[in-house]
Amino acid sequence: MRLFLASLILLSNAFPEPCQSYNCDSVAVRAILDSNKFTNVRVSDVSTKNASNRIDSLKLTPGLPSSKIPSKITTIPNDIGKLSSLIWLSLSGNNISTIPDSFANLSNLSWLSLSGNKISSLPNSFTKLSNLKTLSFSGNPFSVFPTIICSLSNLRELALCCIGIPNISAKISNLTNLYDLDLSYNNITSLPQTIGGLSSLGSFSLTGNQLTLLPSSIGNLHNLYSLYLDNNHITSIPDSLCSISGLSILDVSSNSLCRVTSNVYQWLNSRDLDWKSSQGCVPTIIDVANENQLNTSKSLYLNIHPNPFNSLSTISYEISHNQPGTLQIYSSNGQLIITKHVSGNGILTWNALNYPGGIYICKLILKNKSIITKAIFTK
């Protein structure tokens, strides 16, 4: 109890003597601290800015007993529900495993962090926290997406980093006011099509998951400013992403991005976009209109070796049934610099010493079909 009294020095403005002169919120805080369930608690932030002096901000973190080893909170007592005026609450970095139903009484709560605990599920009463705007559960062992969160329609910021979830509930589209969503470092293998319903989303982090593809509905996130997809297994980017005019940051590094459509490639290179490309892979650029036909007929083949190159590059091509076609090379700004009529299979040796270093596009055309590959000239 002496430790509690020492900690309560930080509450000197909130608890003038006698304590009975304050309302039930102040008494509730002291009752919680006096509980043996909060051993060695350190009260680090308290605010009573409202006119009635009711507690509206509280942070409870592990204390530092005489042994100098922090002691962590393991249980939240039901009395916490008496803090009905609470707006800001941090219980991060403890050993809490359950949330009491009395949490539902914190109807004014706007900011809540329970990151770094041992919580694996949420009570149904959690849905009553309708005023929550910022919520962090990062670093808890959920393993299954906590669907209850999807009922908190006023959320603006949601952090679910490092909680071990393999997928996301389709109900996430209910969070139409969400602006910042952090789902990084989980085991997510796919995104639901309903992700496109997050109409207010501005920042989206999916770093360090198991994604291979993105749903076409991601193009419906018209307010998206930054998208972090690094350290996944993504092999292609959907054309729908090109419809996000406000996207300024795109990180797809450390993926398997070896295949993008010509629309996506032109979009990436025509905009002032801060994007980090896939490492260790030179993407093949496919004409999306003919992609399915090319996959079945195998009528065209185009390859560049070495790539990147510093002077000479060998362009190998093949057109089935010796049909006539056209081989073209474009500069990065879209200027046609070489045209060659070809048929069957063959090799074109390209000496690029008279051209500036940079990215060039090689295109093989057969009637209404085409295949495109990027060449990198390092002069």
Image: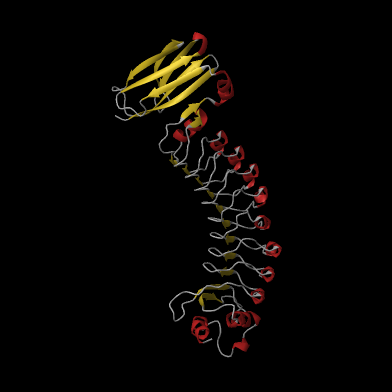
Give coordinates of residue 277: x percent, y percent.
Answer: 43, 39
Name of the residue lying farthest toward the bottom: 18
The quarter of the picture where residue 59 lies is bottom right
Compared with residue 121, is residue 238 higher up or lower down, i.e. above or below?
above
Horizontal side of residue 28 vs 325, given as left or right: right
Residue at 45% in and 20% down: 302
Give coordinates of residue 171: x percent, y percent.
Answer: 68, 50
Give coordinates of residue 274: x percent, y percent.
Answer: 43, 42
Compared with residue 117, is residue 345 higher up or lower down, i.e. above or below?
above
Quadrant position of the C terminus in the picture? top left
Q: Nearer the viewer, residue 258 or 127?
A: 258
Residue at 52% in and 83% down: 4
Residue at 58% in and 65% down: 112
Specify how the rendered protein is coloured.
Answer: secondary structure
Horizontal side of residue 272 vs 291, given as left or right: left
The quarter of the picture where residue 77 lies is bottom right
Q: Nearer the viewer, residue 174 or 92?
A: 92
Quadrant position of the N terminus in the picture? bottom right
Compared with residue 249, is residue 87 higher up or lower down, i.e. above or below?
below
Give coordinates of residue 283: x percent, y percent.
Answer: 45, 31
Total of numbered circles in the picture? Answer: 0
